[in-house]
Amino acid sequence: MSERIGMEIALAAAEAVALCKPDVVAAYPITPNTHIPEHLSDIVAEGRLDADFICVESEHSALSACCGASGAGARTFTATSSQGLLYMAEIVPIVSAMRLPVVMAIGNRALSGPINIWNDHSDIMSQRDTGWISLFAADGQESVDMMIQAFRIAEHRDVMLPVNINLDGFQLTHVVEPMMMPDQKEVDRFLPAYKPYAALHPDNIVSMGALAMPDIFNEAMQAKDHVLINSKEVILDVWKEWEEQFGRKYEPIGAYRMDGAEIALLTMGSMGDTAEVAIDELREKGVKAGLLKLKLWRPFPTEELLKAVKGLKTLVVIDRAVSFGGPGAPVCSEIKAALYDQKERPLITNYIIGLGGRDVVVTDFVKMVQQAIGPQKKKPAKAYEIYGVRGS
């Protein structure tokens, strides 16, 4: 039976992974993700998890080891952050192309340079188009739950794709929160033993990662695109089953005080909880404000977005990464693209916040909404604004 615990989120995430009984864990430490594989290595050493923990010399080797292990039929897990994810970048799209259900936790951290170990979303945004299912946790409970859900989603016969779970570095990974931790029997009931669709074995020869000539490459890319798009149906089914078993509801886009809202914030990750307090304050002042929390980044939930923004006059999209030289930040660009063909759509204001771990507090969210209310009947003066830049 699930037990309420108080624990650092990174350690709780590792405990959740252990409940999934991975066969192979390969990881290389990098701040602020280190505590996840470090604690998993402790769990293995203590004999609580029967798994091979591979201490590799780099993140490139970590994902390469997971790629090989998954190809041989093992349930596999890894974790990384920032430059570590970039070091994996050569292997990241190969894992999805080979339809290997590897699960990876990402303790989101700013990309260098300048060197910065604190949180933003520039690391995962750099790997947006690599064919992985991508989930964003807003708190400790979602971090625990999504770790378990990820294995179920990844290993589904209609999916067979890798999944990354994004936890804001420090703002989630190093924070102690109360959460419900499922027990082993509950996880075993939700997550069946892994039976690979195909596995490398000398007695049953298969080919993985073969050469694709130009005359079949288009078809291979279309197949990869289709399976990722279609994985949303499985994700929704898994989340429904999770709610039935554990009582916690998951949706591609969570809503907070959206009834009658005319203006809404849209956030990803841990900033959503802070934004909730701002919405409460704005409501008390008579502002018809609400909050949308984007939890499913890939496949992008276009249908759910269209429903969520219906009736809004203004949508304030919050990004935590810069698309240098582009027409907008990554999340906002996607939102605008999804809404482009709609006859009725809200005006969109884009703020880039919290880069490199810069604090963003309740009053900042209140100010962003108040600023966005001004141009509700006209196009915003700028495509985006990096909020809080000193001296600007």
Image (spheres, rainbow, N blue to C red):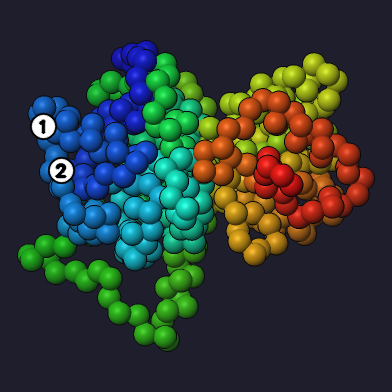
Q: Residue at x 28, y 71 (%)?
A: 209
The kind of secondary structure element at disc 2 is strand
Residue 26 or residue 342, whichever sits in front = 26
Gap between marks 2 and 1 measured at Cα: 9 Å
Q: Quadrant of the N terminus?
A: top left
Q: Position of residue 275 (x, y in %)?
A: 65, 28
Between residues 249 and 345, which one lies in front from this camera angle? 345
Callout 1 secondary element: helix
Residue 84 sits above or below residue 182 on the image = below
Q: Which residue is mark 2?
A: 53
Q: Is residue 253 left or right of residue 285?
A: left
Relative to 134, is 325 above or below?
below
Place of residue 317 in the rendered image (x, y in percent of width and height, measured from the top left): 69, 44
Q: Quadrant of residue 333?
A: bottom right
Q: Residues within 10 Å of mark 2 (few under 14, many from 20)?
A: many
User: Which mark is drawn over residue 97?
Assistant: none
Is 126 located above or below residue 166 in the figure? Answer: below
Residue beneath the point at 82% across and 37% down: 371
How many residues crowd around disc 1 within 10 Å: few (fewer than 14), some, or many (20 or more)?
A: few
**Quarter occupied by residue 190:** top left
Query: Is the C-beta separation of discs 2 and 1 under 8 Å?
Result: yes
Q: Is residue 231 visible?
A: no
Q: Residue 220 appears in which quarter of the rendering?
A: bottom left
Residue at the disc numbered 1: 45
Please name the amino acid that badge 2 sits on.
Phe
Considering only order in the chain, which callout, 1 or 2, is on the residue closer to the N terminus? 1
In percent of width and height, residue 102 lies at 31, 50
Residue at position x 63%, y 42% from top?
A: 353
